Image: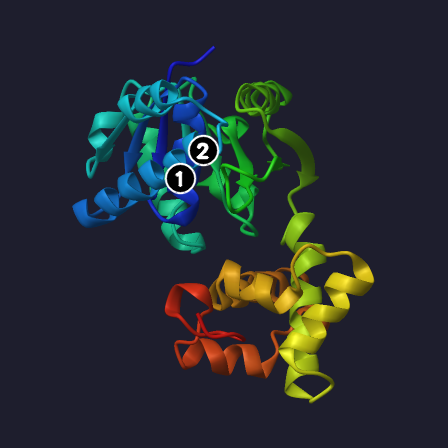
Amino acid sequence: MFRTVAVIGAGTMGNGIAQVFAQAGFSVRLVDVGQPMLERARSTIEKSLGKFVEKGRISAADRDAALGRLTTTTSLDLLTDVDYVVEAIAEDAKAKQALFTSLDALVRPDVVLASNTSSISITALGAATRRPDKVLGMHFMNPVPIVMLVEMIRGQATSAESMGVASELCAALGKTPVEAADYPGFIANRVLMPMINEAVYAVMEGVGTPVAIDAVMKLGMSHPMGPLALADFIGLDVCLAILNVMQEGFGDPKYRPCPLLRRMVAAGHLGRKSGQGFYAY
């Protein structure tokens, strides 16, 4: 089994992914373009592991060992010897394709390149490389250290062997892999985003307040979090980006993002990360 894993992108998802690999005993190299992002990520991981120690889920020694296995860098050139790569940069197809082309030229030919994309075509990412059989989707869910699911996406050219390697990795992380085909939004967002979008339409049309809509879904449908609170948690800009990918990919008006969602994103009301979305934080 592998020893060294690279995680590219030190945002919310990237630092969560880096944490679970480090906790599971892997050496992790976390990469981002700027040192401040890497410092913030390390601090977030330290806090998260600290909470696990407080709750008795891991020991202080486990925490220290996990942090010891994590190194950060702003240079892709330090990844030449890694055994597996997970990309977790912004949800932008062109940026991801450019990164995959760079990684393909850099890492060993046997290394699997996985993307944490929540909606972008794995087939298109694979086509940007000379190893499309070793490119797949490994969509972790936020918060990564807590949510057990990893959505596994097989591109048009992804080999069964590569999927097997990724599934074994999921097991090593204590996660449950569930396979999805390479269609826009995969399974999770194909079902989730239309629900969130419809909830936004219900706000825009005055059907109910955000509190009322979320209460109906929590109390009536047993959802742990209402769709609007969840949208704020995910980031309204991320929701909009995924809906745009789905609308473009399927050409179906049912995925058209609600005008209110577009307006809130344009205003910079992105949810928790900006302090204001459907709720104030």
The circle on residue 48 is 1
Q: Position of residue 174 (x, y in %)?
A: 58, 24
Distance from disc 1 to disc 2, alpha carbons, whole Å, reads 7 Å
The number of callouts visible is 2
**Residue count near mark 2 (Cα–Cα under 10 Å), binned few <14, some 14–19, many ≥20:** some
Residue appearing at x 58%, y 83% in the figure: 259
Vertical placement of residue 138 versus 21, above or below = below
Q: Residue 243 appears in which quarter of the rendering?
A: bottom right
**Residue count near mark 1 (Cα–Cα under 10 Å), binned few <14, some 14–19, many ≥20:** some
Vertical placement of residue 46 versus 223, above or below = above
Camera sees residue 198:
no
The circle on residue 52 is 2
Vertical placement of residue 265 versus 66, above or below = below
Q: Position of residue 197 (x, y in %)?
A: 65, 71
Residue appearing at x 35%, y 46% in the figure: 98
| Residue at the farthest right position | 220
- 140 vs 111, nearest the viewer: 140
From the viewer's perspective, tell me whether residue 6 is left or right of residue 227: left
| Residue at the farthest top position | 1
- 60 vs 102, nearest the viewer: 60
Q: Circles 1 and 2: CB distance less than 8 Å?
A: yes
Q: Where is the C terminus found, in terms of image quarters? A: bottom left
Residue appearing at x 40%, y 32% in the figure: 19
Amino acid type at image mark 1: Ser
SS category of the residue bearing label 1:
helix
Amino acid type at image mark 2: Phe
Q: Position of residue 245 (x, y in %)?
A: 56, 61
From the viewer's perspective, tell me whether residue 114 is left or right of residue 247: left
Camera sees residue 77:
yes
The circle on residue 145 is none
From the viewer's perspective, tell me whether residue 204 is left or right of residue 268: right
SS category of the residue bearing label 2:
helix
